[in-house]
Image (cartoon, rainbow, N blue to C red):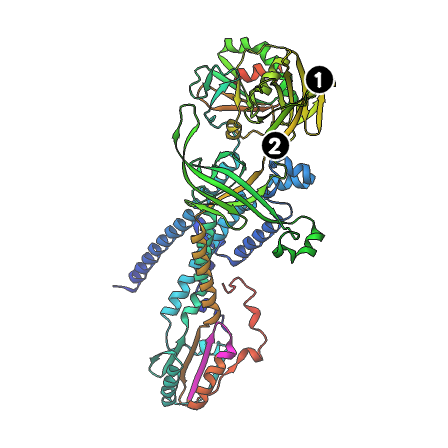
Amino acid sequence: MLDMKYDGADLRSKRRPKSWIDRVWSFFASVKVGLWLIGLIIVGSAVGTIFPQEMYIPQQLPASQYYTQEYGTAGTIYYSLGFHNLYTSWWYISLIVMLTLSLIVASIDRLVPLYKALKYQPVRRTDRFMRGQRLIGEGNGSEAQIDMMEQSLKAKRYRVKRDGDALLAEKHRFGRWGPYVNHVGLVIFFIGAMLRVFPSFHVDTLEWVREGDTVALEATGDEYYIRNDQFILEMYDPENNEEDAKFAEAIEKAGAVPKNYETELTLFKKTGTNEDGSPRLEEVETGSTKVNHPFKFDKYEVYQEQYSSRPEFLSMSFSVGDKETGDIYGPFTVDMNDPETTYDLGEVAVSLRDLYPDFEVRNGEPDTKSPRALNPAFFFTVDTPEGASESNLIGIRMNVADENNRYAIQFAGTEMASTSGLRVKSDSTYPILIVGGTIFMIGIVMGMYWPHRRVWIRRHGETDVLVAGFTNKNPSSLRREVSPLLEKAGLPIWEDQAMFEKQTDANSTNERGES
Amino acid sequence: MTKESKSGDRMQQAMAHKKKRSFWRLMVMTMVLFAGAVVVMQLIEQAGSDGRVAAGDDAPNFKLVSLDGATMVERETYEGKGLLLNFWGTFCEPCKKEMPVVQANYSALQDMGVDFWAVNVGETPLRVDNFVNDLGVDLDYPILMDTRSEVEKAYGIYNLPVTFVIDENGKVIEKYEGELTKEKLMELAEKSL
């Protein structure tokens, strides 16, 4: 049987390469190379899932240290080969670029000769060609019968061409372009994927914003600022909420189950810089972001992604009690970020001598572990009306003071702030990816559901007629479609050669894979 | 026309055709590979800039007020030759240890035309003031208060202490993470010139 791939057309890359340009071209035109590239991309993608990607690791450690610390040598290798940022690693992108080139080159290399071969195909084919087809029949027949066949093929929506006593009927040729349309879609898709590397097309950053704080959004090039007005964490409450009571059993098993994470926020736009270097901000709008319901502005989306499980103290209030009279003075409030150092309460005055935002005792001295107000402690002195000064070290569940002190400082309240982790994203490549994906699907459908079918009929000798059929998919269906017509016209019925000869696959192992 | 010259014509045509084809092949491959190279270059550039200022980058500008509130400095208007920009916190032991060393050599640095700015990362003036007083050494070099942690964020600070060596054009020559010894301090100062 004849090799009908690309309609027997001569693939350019199969000719003996002469110059280096042709050699490179042939390399990329090879299906084997394309399959290797796809294989490598799949293996690379698979390896990239072994350890978490960089965006999912904790923020405290830089990635260069995290992978080694967490996963040892394997982690070091993983990091140094760029698997931690797989889709933007240079080698992964290089593979995608080569695959793109391979798709383009292989498509041109096949499409051009195939197109020409089909466009200029003769109606009258050689004896050898006809007998080389999978469906072939030979027997008695006349030109009148061929004319009759022409009509019935037309009724089956074949496009029929005649050349004297020879006939060519064809339908669904465009199905042959399916793979190439598919490749075009893929190439567009890859272009979209590669554009994601450029910040003007795709940005994605995580911003930690404490309640009350305003931060510049790096993703917007610091053009926009967001203030966290309130972070809301709602738990399922089966006891007080009828709706939630349905899940009481499950909640009991799982412990506290969050129902809603939400950040109420205000968006600002930077309009200039103030004298002291701080940004001049103009309020744009207020809104909120919940899980799966991002806050949208400009071309950006703000997703509620994380929150800090340890809220920070914004301020703490205290009052001063007179142990002798029972009088209470105050309360007064200490702002953790910008504390006053003296608090005049009338009878007594309190001085804040020191403030340890994250208290610990180091080398026998009070100290702080970090600048974050997670576990604050305060060193106060109370100036009594008698002119004495009494020291107090107050912290959470800690009150170090002289027993003989007349005044005692007590907690009166706290104001806490949660920190919300917001992911700010913008992706202008979605339309490109959607267009690419759609074209890809159209290509697949074209190639899948519209098999290219051709029927050749011609006189052979004085009394005989040759009938041959070709299809790139599902030959038995072509047979079922046309055999009754042949029967009706009284022409020889064709047979499927492949049913008798078990040799058809000999050619498919070579380089010309159907693509 | 003879048969031979006809086939010669056809040869010439085929050659011209082939040349044209080679040209287009080269064009297609070059364009795809060039676009790919641009993407890869962009990636490599981004890999270097993960939001953290490193050697070779331009030092981001900032304006900060000193601990005593008396002076305000701006990176861009700095007029000395070199600048050592140090980040520190009261909770960081090596920071505490390096401060007397810096103080002892500060006049030598100034003679070289190099200034030393110590930016505190997001603490209250109260705490920093107490810390500096407890240090037992008077510091002549400026302690700058980054109370809102904005400069810290702009420079992408992870570990403390860290010292950026900045030349007179505002370019970061080196980023040194770790405690400064006298030798290291002088070495960094030399580099900033």
Drawn side of residue A394 relative to residue B12, left or right: right
Please tell me which of labels 2 and 1 falls first in the chain.
1
Do residues under tags 2 and 1 come within 8 Å of each other at their CB atoms?
no
Q: What's under tag 1, amino acid-wise?
A: Asn
What's the chain of the residue with tag 1?
A
Q: Quadrant of residue A108?
A: bottom left
Residue A414's disc number? 2
What's the chain of the residue with tag 2?
A
Note whether residue A200 is visible.
yes
Note whether residue A11 is visible.
no
Residue A465 forms part of the magenta stretch: yes
Task: Tell me the SS state at disc 2.
Answer: strand
Badge 2, how many Cα within 10 Å: few under 14, some, many 20+? Answer: some
Task: Tell me the SS state at disc 1.
Answer: loop
Badge 1, how many Cα within 10 Å: few under 14, some, many 20+? Answer: some
Q: Quadrant of residue A220?
A: top left
Residue A144's disc number? none
Judged by depth in the image, the label closer to the viewer, 2 or 1, is: 1
Closer to us: A452 or A264:
A264
Residue A91 forms part of the magenta stretch: no
Residue A428 placement (x, y as % from top left): 43, 48
Residue A479 placement (x, y as % from top left): 49, 81
